[in-house]
Amino acid sequence: MCLFASVRVFLMVTSVTASSTHALQNLSETRKIVVYTSNGCHKCSVLKNWLKAACREFEERDLENVDVMAELVMRDIVVLSAPVMEVDESVFTEDQFFDGDSLSVNKLAGILGGNGNGEQ
């Protein structure tokens, strides 16, 4: 099932290459990923599609939900723009895995690989 979903999403997201998808699949699958999104957010869609293409499970939380924002504030996390990605308990803002409007596959793979600095 995941393979067919990956092919479909791969065709939708032109910034995803076969090598980047393969590299991400080789990373640890046990990391908890939460993607904070907002309605109409193009970068949010790009990030979610890339994670789906790489067969990575993630939880999506809506930043427009008052309870979600309250939880972030209680944790002293300030979100100014979407998407925001939490990997295990580390929070990364969109400028840490996007270069302008383009998803930085190397930075994202570095974050998901566990080195925390967005570099492989």
Image: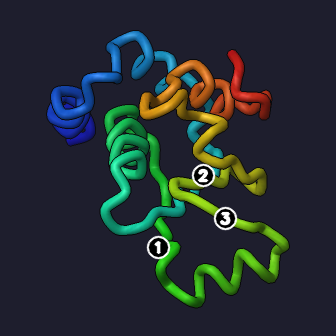
Label located before the other in sequence (3 or 2):
3
Which residue occupies the foreground of this view, 9 or 73? 73
Instruction: Identify the amino acid type marked 2.
Output: Met
Left or right? Give the position of 85 relative to 78: left
Label number found at residue 79: 3
Q: Nearer the viewer, mark 3 or mark 2?
A: 3
Q: CA distance from mark 3 to mark 2?
A: 11 Å
Instruction: List x then y, in percent, for residue 58.
Output: 48, 54
User: Dot 2: few (<14), some (14–19), or many (≥20) neighbours within 10 Å?
Assistant: many
The quarter of the picture where the C terminus appears is top right
User: Dot 3: few (<14), some (14–19), or many (≥20) neighbours within 10 Å?
Assistant: some
Instruction: List x then y, in percent, for residue 51.
Output: 42, 40
The residue drawn where x is 35% and y is 68% is 39
The quarter of the picture where the N terminus appears is top left
Label number found at residue 85: 2
Instruction: Identify the amino acid type marked 3.
Output: Val
Label number found at residue 62: 1
Residue placed furthest toward the top: 19
Which residue occupies the foreground of this view, 60 or 23? 60
The residue drawn where x is 66% and y is 54% is 86
